[in-house]
Amino acid sequence: MKKSIFITVVFFITLCSGCKKFLNVDSQDSLSGNNFWQTRQDMESFTREVYRLFREGVAIRSGLIMVGDLRCMPVAQGAYPPRGDFSLLARNDIRTLVNTPRIQNNENTFWQLHGAWDYIGDWSPIYKVIQSANILFDKAPEVKQRDASITDAMVKKYQAEAVFMRCVSYFFLIRLFGDVPYYTNAYNDAALPRTKDVEVAKACLKELEAYKEYLPWTPDDPANRAVRAMRGSALALEMYFNMWLAGIDAGNATSYYQETDRLGDELQGSGAYRLLSLQDIALVFAGRSEEGLFEVPQNVNYGDVLGNIRRTFTGAVLHYPYIQLNQNSTKSELTYKDGYLKKLFPPDVTDGRKEVWFDANIYNEDGTMQCFKFFNLALGENNTTSSLSNYFIIFRYAGALLLQAEALANIEKNSPKAIELLNAVRQRAGADDYTAPASAEGDPLGDAIFWEERRELIGEGHAYYDMVRTRKVYNPDYCDRPMLYSNFVRGAWTWPIDAKALTNNPYMTLNTYWGNN
């Protein structure tokens, strides 16, 4: 335990001691002493640190995961205290969002203190994950020479976990910033330019394809299910990379759709994952379920939830008596506007998610609506702290099925296979099957899948990025708060990069839209 804590502290000091070295680290021998990297336990402790760094940098340091449910979406402040950040994200005013200063006891900057949106532009916490994953990949073979209990298969598994964590980190980076510095060497000491996002994604796909076979379909220890990389985690990440590439490399979109379909078949064919029933859906968000593919744990015993509740979708859409953020207010801090929930869940359409995930005020737009999707009602009102201990879901089986359906619908307008996948998710939800119209203009199946993704994945951080990759973010038929096409092509879809990235790096550039507009 002491060794693990020491590694953590040294990582923090070394990697955050200045902007000069934000993309490189010193030799591990100098960090942890010559006695490190001797045993399998050393390798296991370091691997757990990689996951901890991802959890810190992506899930709990800021409201990064929430961005996908708020940006260019029909959301607004529902109740006191003022949450001006929701409106800023809705209208894509990211400049104001990140430049608003933090002022203690100032009602007008309350949201900045709790959302920590200004942290997102500093990509160094995510690069810490990449740095540590690079070191793990490099050092794992050396440990085998020193610990006879380590097999070649163990080394490959740890390296495969390193590859997955490196690639999922790059996935978050390119969705946020577009082009980003890319490297895989353990001890980078060179100033790096930004690599085209297409090339980063392709490089990650090549690595994932090469190493996924060394990951287990399910871990031997159930406690590691979905919170450590599995083969299903890698397949899902490959699917998401391919669908992202279909948007940014449109000339080759068909090949990416075909690859997504192939990966989806591999995922389904494993038999390792399944859709849980709607009655058991709370188990999905409680973590480590058979539907989970990759997720970030929360542990209420360590204060994870209460300290970061305002950086989560759950904290925004619940109020007293389930959570008491608003001085026992009977209104949530976030509300959907313009009939959005009526569009997703029409009153006259059967869908069990309306009753399981929402209260009777589902269509109210004054803050009284509550969403219990990530809140375990079974634990009761008197145990609200434990009820909030749900995981950050990065990938799950239902999302992968819908992604494969989307790919198929882009290949074949009325793909029977796509309809089957779409209906698998709808049937689990207690909703009526989709049936192809006899004749229709446009893309009714593609639209049905898009809106099913919005329903099924609400609150999981996908909506905005799905609209960006499909180029629907500037189309008012799909995006309730569309950005101008001219702004989109100038980079308005990206997040502004913190200016500290320029320090001691003559090859670095920022996202020009946010600097020049």
Image (cartoon, grey):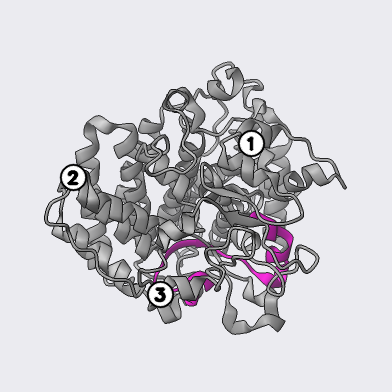
Q: Where is residue 91 in the image (x, y as percent from the top left)?
A: 57, 37
Mark 3 and mark 1 residues within 8 Å of each other at the beta carbon: no
Cα distance in 3D space between marks 2 and 3: 29 Å
Q: What element carries label 2?
A: loop
The nearer-to-camera label among 3 and 1 is 3
Q: Position of residue 174 (x, y in %)?
A: 46, 37
Upstream in sequence: badge 2 or badge 3: 3
Numbered tag placed on residue 122 in the rendering: 1
**Which mark identifies residue 441?**
2
Q: In which quarter of the image is the N terminus?
A: bottom right
Badge 3 element:
loop
On the image, the x and y values in percent for residue 322 come to 68, 73
| Nearest to viewer (mark 2 / mark 3) | 2
Query: Residue 481: where, in percent of width, then height?
Result: 49, 40
Q: Quadrant of the C terminus?
A: top right
Amino acid of disc 3: Gly
Q: Which residue lies furthest to the left in this view?
A: 438
How packed mark 1 is, by other alpha carbons closer than 10 Å (few <14, some 14-19, many 20 or more), is: some
Residue located at (60% from left, 56% from top): 335
Decide which of tag 1 and tag 2 comes sooner along the chain.
1
Q: How many marks?
A: 3
Q: Quadrant of residue 307?
A: bottom right
Please tell me which residue lies in front, 225 or 155.
225
Q: Which residue is drawn at 51% across and 46% down?
A: 73
Mark identifier at residue 352: 3
Q: Which numbered dot is residue 132?
A: none
Amino acid found under the numbered disc labelled 1: Asp
Q: Residue furthest right?
A: 105
Q: How crowded is mark 3: few (under 14 residues within 10 Å), some or many (20 or more)?
A: some
Q: Is residue 440 above or below residue 196?
A: below
The magenta segment is 282-311
The type of residue carrying mark 2 is Glu
